[in-house]
Image (cartoon, rainbow, N blue to C red):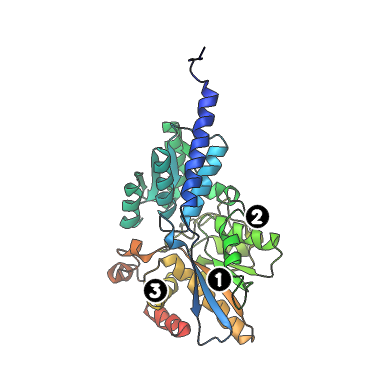
Amino acid sequence: MTDASPLPAARLATRWTDEAVRRIEADFNRSADTHLIRVELPRFPGITLYLKDESVHPTGSLKHRLARSLILYAICNGWVGPDTVLIEASSGSTAVSEAYFAHLLGLRFIAVVPASTSSAKLDAIRFHGGEIHMVDDPRQAYGAAARLAAETGGHYLDQFTYAERATDWRGNNNIAESIFAQMTREDHPVPAWIVCGAGTGGTSATIGRYIRYGRYPTRLCVADPEASVFHRHYADRTIQTLDQGCGSCIEGIGRPRVEASFIPGVIDRMIAVPDAASIGAMRAISQRLGRPVGGSTGTNIHACLMLIEEMAARGEQGAVVTILCDSGQRYADSCYDDDWLGARAVQWQAEERRIAALLGR
């Protein structure tokens, strides 16, 4: 005789978890790895720049990897079920990617974002079914996200706490493993430097740990907006916050407080980059590539060329790898709007000319 009694709640939860993980893994299998773009530098013989192009992810940025890891981490810890509302505090890109995965799983998603977030990112969050909760001061986002999670009985994904632990830094298709695998047939298969920014600190933690785990001689440099706390904390561990907040116009990187996922011990060097230098480098590399990139990529490029100039001065050769974080299409009304930049007194033109000259043709 067939038993028609309902399945116990625990078994139903396990079935949902199994199906949620399957959907996320199936989505991953449909996505090819991101490209590694080689940029020749005629002014620096023997030194080559590479860009890991994270803009080609389904949600258009490096944060696609993070969102997938955070949500899998939460599901496998038993924090998320079929009726859980997902909440995140984000400057935009992480929320876009989390909204995508929440929609994939049929879950409600609320993004807590600063009012200054670009309209293109807000549109992308809504496109994937996410809801927007704005705060005037970015420092209010943490508390607002926690409060919404309590009010809805949902789960605060909290990228700033869990980014470094949600990603398997030993391998399993993380960005560091991908970079080293793609470099194996290049002139200099082991990079002299890898350069990235820090928003949560998760990417730098993953790359820095992987370098040490693989016993590579590669050094890790983190490029940080001048107005951010991270480079100050790196130099002096007693500095934890900036009372005035982080006034940078570069979205996605830089923070007013040291986040739990930021691990300074795996970093070999930090470079503080003025916003004008980030914007100028963003414009210059966009011209070289023939397509627009975001402001945080400009921050990375500025730091890369500092390192490359130093290498050349010492007579060194090698490869420098950095991350193309996202497309510039999301910043048409901000970083690519001259009036918007002018209102913020960002004088980027001289830096664009300088970086363009260094990049050559």
Which label sits in the foreground, 3 or 2? 2
Residue that label 2 marks: 170
Q: Position of residue 241 (x, y in %)?
A: 54, 55
Question: Mark 3–mark 1 contact, CB under 8 Å?
Answer: no
Is residue 231 visible to the viewer in this orientation of the structure?
yes
Residue 234 lies, in percent from the top left, at: 61, 62
Q: Which mark is residue 144?
A: none
Q: Is residue 22 above or below residue 320?
A: above
Count of marks, rendered view: 3
Q: Which residue lies most toward the front here? A: 1
Residue that sits furthest to the right in the current view: 215
Quarter occupied by residue 153: top left
Q: Judge from the rendering whether residue 123 lies leftward or rightward of residue 33; answer left or right.
A: left
- Indicate the quadrant containing the C terminus: top left, top right, bottom left or bottom right: bottom left
Q: Is residue 12 above or below residue 250?
A: above
Structural distance between the alpha carbons of marks 3 and 1:
17 Å
Question: Residue 321 shows which numbered tag?
Answer: 1
Residue 56 sits in quarter: bottom left
Q: Secondary structure at mark 3?
A: helix
Tell me the amino acid under the disc marked 3: Ser
Instruction: Give the mark nearer the N terminus: 3 vs 2.
Output: 2
Looking at the picture, tell me which residue is in the foreground, 217 or 279: 217
Which element type, helix, strand or loop, lies under badge 2? Answer: loop
Name the side, left or right, on which 324 lies relative to 333.
right
| x then y, percent, for residue 345 | 35, 71
Q: Residue shown at 52%/78% (left/top)?
A: 305
State the separation of the CA atoms marked 1 and 2: 19 Å
**Residue holding disc 3:** 286
- The amino acid at mark 1 is Val
Q: Earlier in the sequence, mark 3 or mark 1?
A: 3
